[in-house]
Amino acid sequence: MPVEVKNEVLLSIQNLHVWFELRRWGFGHAGYVQAVDGVSFDLRQGEAIGIVGESGCGKTTLMKTILGLCQPTRGEISFKGIELSTKGSREMKFYRSQVGYVQQDPYGALPPFMNVRRILEEPMIINGMKSQAEREQRIRSVLEEVKMTPVENFVTKFPHMLSGGQQQRVVIARAMILEPKLIVADEPVSMLDASVRVEILRLLRRLR
């Protein structure tokens, strides 16, 4: 088995550009929106990087490009030394299993027709974990990690039955359920009350 180096570069972004074409009357070229324009950084094992900027500066586009939801116009994204633009759908599925995603709006991020157990179970089913006992054990473990205990009080609840802070803890638990190497968080506390923000930031720091 390969040995993980604590200081190795996990994610490398080099001269990344993401431009969106503008069209006139649906077919005529009218220029570009330069959403991301020349971003470069390296993220190492155990590090956290904060992207700061005003609304509309391209933070969310950068995040979506890291997740593989937007295609780079130019530049490179490498994960553990492997350039992602050369990878096919199977490799990208594996990559996405290595990346957890924490959305900005916890209530909008959670399907209202699923309870907490089903929300956390879904990624494991999609990624081929067939054992019900293993899935249940992982659900229990991750809920304990995000301090939603006793677990039995939460697994049967639906999102509308939880507070905003509890909803965001479920979002974080879902991001962690596959034990990813990288977590991408899109303003994870901006939709929460000030009293809850510190709790969530402390939780993210402890988990890191």
Image: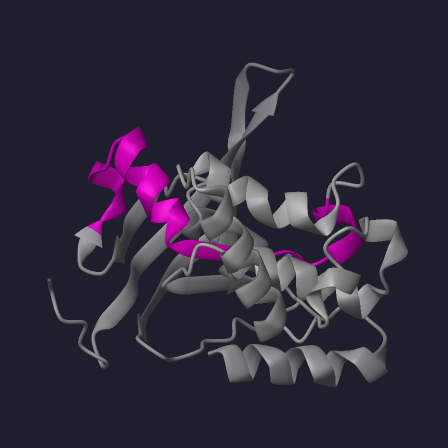
Query: In the displayed structure, would residue 76 be above or below residue 39?
Result: above
Q: How many marks?
A: 0
Quadrant location of the N terminus? bottom left
Q: Is residue 35 visible?
A: no
Image position, residue 85 (x, y; %):
26, 40
How are the colours assigned in the image? one colour
Q: Is residue 140 visible?
A: yes
Q: Quadrant of residue 122?
A: top right
Pick the residue in front: 8 or 14: 8
Q: Which range is magenta?
A: 83-110
> Residue at the location (67% across, 76% down)?
147
Q: For this rendering, which residue is in front, 138 or 201?
A: 138
Q: Is residue 12 left or right of residue 136?
A: left
Instruction: State left or right for residue 115 relative to residue 128.
Output: right
In the rendered structure, the answer to whether residue 2 lies left or right of residue 177 reads: left
Please report the residue visible at 29 percent of the width from the left and 32 percent of the height from the top. 90
Q: Residue furthest left?
A: 1
Q: Residue at position x 70%, y 48% from top?
A: 109
Up-down: is 42 above or below 27? below
Quarter of the figure with residue 37: bottom left
Q: Residue 197 location, x and y as percent? A: 75, 79
What percent of the width, then of the height, locates residue 203? 61, 80
Q: Is residue 131 left or right of residue 193?
A: left
Q: Is residue 27 magenta?
A: no
Give the x, y percent position of residue 45: 30, 75
Q: Residue at x 60, y 50 (%)?
A: 120
Residue 97 falls within the magenta-colored stretch:
yes
Q: Residue furthest front?
A: 133
Front one among 36 and 86? 86
